[in-house]
Structures are given as C-alpha cells and as structure tokens.
Image (cartoon, helix red, strand yellow):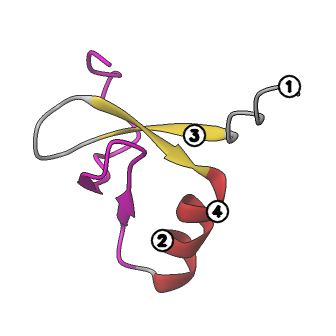
C-alpha cells in the first residue's frame, strides 16, 4: 500500500514569529472565508499572516 499523499500547502509568513508556516489549502480557504487573517498551520500553530511585502522567514 502506498503512503497517503501529503496535503497541498501554502506558505504563510507569521506576523508574530517571523517564520514561514505551511498551511493546508483547506485551512487556508477556511481562514479566507472567515476574513480574520488567521490560519492553522500543519504544526498546529495559529498564524497571523504578515503583510505580503514581508520576505519569507525561516521554515
């Protein structure tokens, strides 16, 4: 049996810790729909998205 496919993700830089977190596409969509600018990363951390002009932080 093959391993399950990894979820598709979107990198989002956190305004709080400056790190880039991987957000599953369904969680990213949920954050967009909520309009809060907050997303739950694969690591479990709630991420407040930094402005898109901010360079990516370390993973």
| Circle 4 or circle 1, nearest the eye | 1
**Where is mark 3, residue-wise?**
10
Residue placed farthest to the left in the image?
16
Q: Quadrant of residue 36?
A: bottom left
From the viewer's side, name the closer residue of 2 and 52: 2
User: What's the CA distance linking mark 3 and mark 4?
Assistant: 10 Å
Magenta span dominant secondary structure: loop
Bin the neighbour count of mark 4 within 10 Å (Cα to Cα): few under 14, some 14-19, many 20 and up.
few
**Where is mark 4, residue-wise?**
26
Image spot of residue 43 (x, y percent)? 33, 42
Q: Are marks 3 and 2 in contact (CB under 8 Å)?
A: no
Q: Who's the residue at 68% across and 41% down the image?
A: 7
Query: What numbered label is drawn on residue 31?
Result: 2
Query: What numbered label is drawn on residue 59?
Result: none
Q: Secondary structure at mark 2?
A: helix
Q: Secondary structure at mark 3?
A: strand
- Which of the two labelled residues, at mark 3 and mark 2, occupies the earlier sequence position? 3
- Which of the two labelled residues, at mark 2 and mark 4, occupies the earlier sequence position? 4
**Where is mark 1, residue-wise?**
2
- Which of the two labelled residues, at mark 1 and mark 3, occupies the earlier sequence position? 1
| Circle 2 or circle 4, nearest the eye | 4
Asked if the magenta segment contains residue 46, the reply would be: yes
Bin the neighbour count of mark 2 within 10 Å (Cα to Cα): few under 14, some 14-19, many 20 and up.
some
Q: Which residues are magenta?
A: 36-59
């Amino acid at each position: 049996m093959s391993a399950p496919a990894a979820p598709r993700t979107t990198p989002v830089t956190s305004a709080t810790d400056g790190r880039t977190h991987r957000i599953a596409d369904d969680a990213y969509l949920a954050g967009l729909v909520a309009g809060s600018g907050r997303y739950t990363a694969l690591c479990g951390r709630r991420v407040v998205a930094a402005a898109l002009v901010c360079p990516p932080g370390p993973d």
